[in-house]
Amino acid sequence: MSLPSVRPPGTLRIVSWNIHGAIGRRRRPNPERTIAEIERMAPDILILQEVDGRTMFGRAAGAFEYVTGALWERLPRETEERASHIVEARTADWPSDDIGNLLWSRFPVSSSRIIDLPGPDIENRKVIEAIVELGGRRLRVLGTHLALLPTTRLKQARTIVDHLTGIDHLPTVLGGDLNEWFPNGWVHSTLSCRLPKVHAPRTWPERVPIAPLDRFYASQDVEIVARGTDARAGVASDHRAISIDVRV
């Protein structure tokens, strides 16, 4: 179900989407189509996975530069300080392997960090942590893309929970492609103990989704007013986008 075009008063829209290197149904990279779908969804906070410019895998070069530039030009923002609105987490070992995650916020990000997650896996995994300033309120937003291996995913989920346990509490939302195939699998059981409010619709493959890979988890003090899955965005990826409207 898509979110309503008219948002409830006082809410913040958060979108998470695995953009699959801007490759959709036509099997060719089309970054402009990806940005057009993001612009249509009109997020206040955006969490992206598989920002991918690896040309050896048929992706368009310069993915991070293109996406960050387009978001800066086409989405509204509260300041003109670029570093206050965009956080990148490039996960490759070599500069030529241009892949990773990205967080964009309409509202200023007062601090951010990149958290390394444990392996083994076929590629590095990281978490973006951003503290978003909402005019006297603060929201911690985490964005990630967990491992393909179930045992590694479990270790990564435990690392996230341990991190949250060891820092000062803030209202918190975690979003991303968690690669968890089952509604109540190991990752869910681990994360939901700390972040009990959940949005985990089926999102993959985008035409006839069978797996709830993409999810949001939120702390008890975050009110989720509406939940949605964006099927239209699937034309530009192999995942559907997910959204929540929240009050903090």
Image (cartoon, helix red, strand yellow):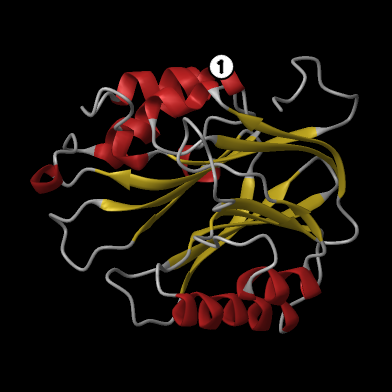
Check the image and report above or below for 68 versus 30: below
- In the image, is 49 to the left or to the right of 24? right
How many numbered marks have been drawn onto this rendered protein structure? 1
Seen at 63% across and 52% down, the residue is 215
Counting from the top left corner in percent of width and height, residue 228 is at 71, 33
- In the image, is 167 to the left or to the right of 175? right
Comparing 52 with 138, the one in front is 52
Comparing 159 with 167, the one in front is 159
Check the image and report above or below for 223 versus 179: above
Q: Mark 1: which secondary structure?
A: helix
Q: Can you identify the residue that label 1 sits on?
A: 40
Seen at 29% across and 68% down, the residue is 123
Seen at 11% across and 42% down, the residue is 55
Residue type (three-letter) at the residue carrying disc 1? Arg
- In the image, is 52 to the left or to the right of 18? left
Counting from the top left corner in percent of width and height, residue 36 is at 44, 17
